[in-house]
Image (cartoon, grey):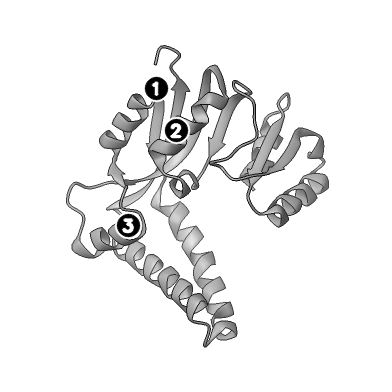
Amino acid sequence: MQTIHLAKICNDCHITATDIYQPFLDKLMENAVKEGLDDRITTVCASMDDLPFEAGEFDIIWSEGSIFVIGFEKGLSYWKQFLKDEGYIALTESTWFTDEPSSEVLQFWQDCYPDIKSIPDTEKVIMAAGYDLIDRFKLPASTWYDFYSNLEKRVDDISDNYKGNTDAETILSFNRKEIKIFREHPDEYGYTFFILQKNTNK
């Protein structure tokens, strides 16, 4: 949906959307055709850590909720080559909102993403990777509540279909745990949106 929205508000740009799963890209283009935006979007099936692009190809790289897959520092360093001089990256990264997270929350993040940092420490990584920080803001908890409400409904809807499937039950159990922890500790962590500019002197 974010790709469609970006295409709607960006009349004179062209978007290259990437994903490792071709059916997602097919669905994107199906929606783009319905919206009359397919002339503004091209899809490329590729992994975010093995991209088939030229150096300096893009003005902006936009990545919401995904850079953690390859690691924040690694992603910033690798993607930098694809930006034009003084190009931008807009992305979200999980960050601590407190210096003293509760033990349950701390253990959860140690298990699923131990690289989570405070906002100041995340900013240090950004600058060390050769970017200037243009702006940042925390995503409101309401965005998470909306997301988790939909996720919880989906988990409930499909749980019976996967009884006895150990792998699926593990994933569904993790989803329920994630939802529970956030609802109990919404002020301790979340996504921060960062806008960065490539520093050509680094």
Badge 1 local density, few (<14 within 10 Å), some, or many (20+)? some
Which secondary structure, mark 1?
loop
Furthest residue toward top: 201
Identify the mark nearer the N-term, 3 or 2: 2
Judging by the rendered image, the residue that carries numbered circle 1 is 130
Residue 44 on image: x %, y %: 70, 41
- Lateral position of residue 43 relative to residue 128, left or right: right
Does the CB distance between marks 1 and 2 fall below 8 Å? yes
Image quadrant holding the C terminus, namely top left
Q: CA distance from mark 1 to mark 2?
A: 9 Å
**Which numbered tag is attached to residue 76?**
2
Dot 2 amino acid type = Leu
Badge 3 local density, few (<14 within 10 Å), some, or many (20+)? some
Does the CB distance between marks 3 and 1 fall below 8 Å? no
Quarter of the figure with residue 82: top right
Residue 18 on image: x %, y %: 65, 42
**Which numbered tag is attached to residue 186?**
3
Q: Is residue 67 shown above or below 125? A: below
Q: Nearer the viewer, residue 99 or 170?
A: 170
Residue 181 on image: x %, y %: 33, 65
Q: Is residue 107 shown above or below 193? A: below
Q: Residue at x 70, y 26 (%)?
A: 13
Dot 1 amino acid type = Gly
Residue 123 on image: x %, y %: 32, 31
Q: CA distance from mark 3 to mark 2?
A: 27 Å
Q: Is residue 59 shown above or below 169? A: above
